[in-house]
Amino acid sequence: MSNKRKITWRCETCRDGRKADEYEAESQKSASQSGIKQQEIMEIKAKFEELSDRIAELEKRDSETKIEIHGLEELAEDNLGETVVKLIEKLDVNVDVS
């Protein structure tokens, strides 16, 4: 009878018992979702810029018209696209939000 012990070493990603390929698949899924969120934020920012340009045009036409929207950058960072679309629609300023 020997006193040998079996030692199994797992890499850091597998220490919780998951297989390495499962971890890799999860990592790739997370990375692709992050990419989608970044794309959505960029699209929202583009809509903000378009809205800002349209507001500037409206203000040029009518010097008494002043439209101010505060917090647009924060909305884009928070990824609140639906809120932004509703806001733009309420303004009724012919901005394509589709």
Image (tube, rainbow, N blue to C red):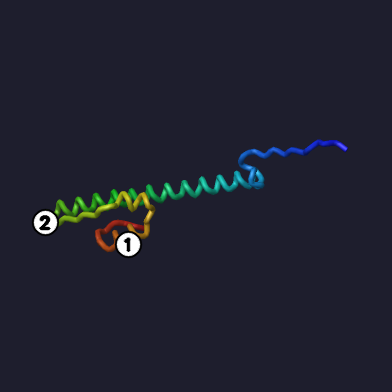
Q: Quadrant of residue 92?
A: bottom left
Provide residue 73's location: percent of width, then percent of height.
31, 49
Closest to the observer: 76 or 92?
A: 76
From the image, tell me which residue sits under label 2: 64
- Give me the disc on residue 1: none
Q: Are marks 2 and 1 in contact (CB under 8 Å)?
A: no
Q: Residue at x 62, y 39 (%)?
A: 12
Q: Quadrant of the N terminus?
A: top right
Query: Which element carries disc 1, helix, strand or loop?
Result: helix
From the image, tell me which residue sits under label 1: 86
Closest to the observer: 22 or 49?
A: 22
Q: Residue at x 33, y 49 (%)?
A: 45
| Distance CA(mark 2)–CA(mark 1) | 25 Å
Provide residue 78's location: percent of width, then percent of height.
37, 52
Q: Is residue 36 left or right of residue 56?
A: right
Q: Residue at x 72, y 39 (%)?
A: 8
**Quick one: label 2, few (<14), some, or many (20+) residues within 10 Å?**
few
Provide residue 32's location: percent of width, then percent of height.
51, 47
**Quick one: label 1, few (<14), some, or many (20+) residues within 10 Å?**
few
Provide residue 84's location: percent of width, then percent of height.
33, 57
* Residue type indicated by callout 1: Lys
Q: Is residue 29 left or right of residue 45?
A: right
Q: Is residue 77 left or right of residue 17?
A: left
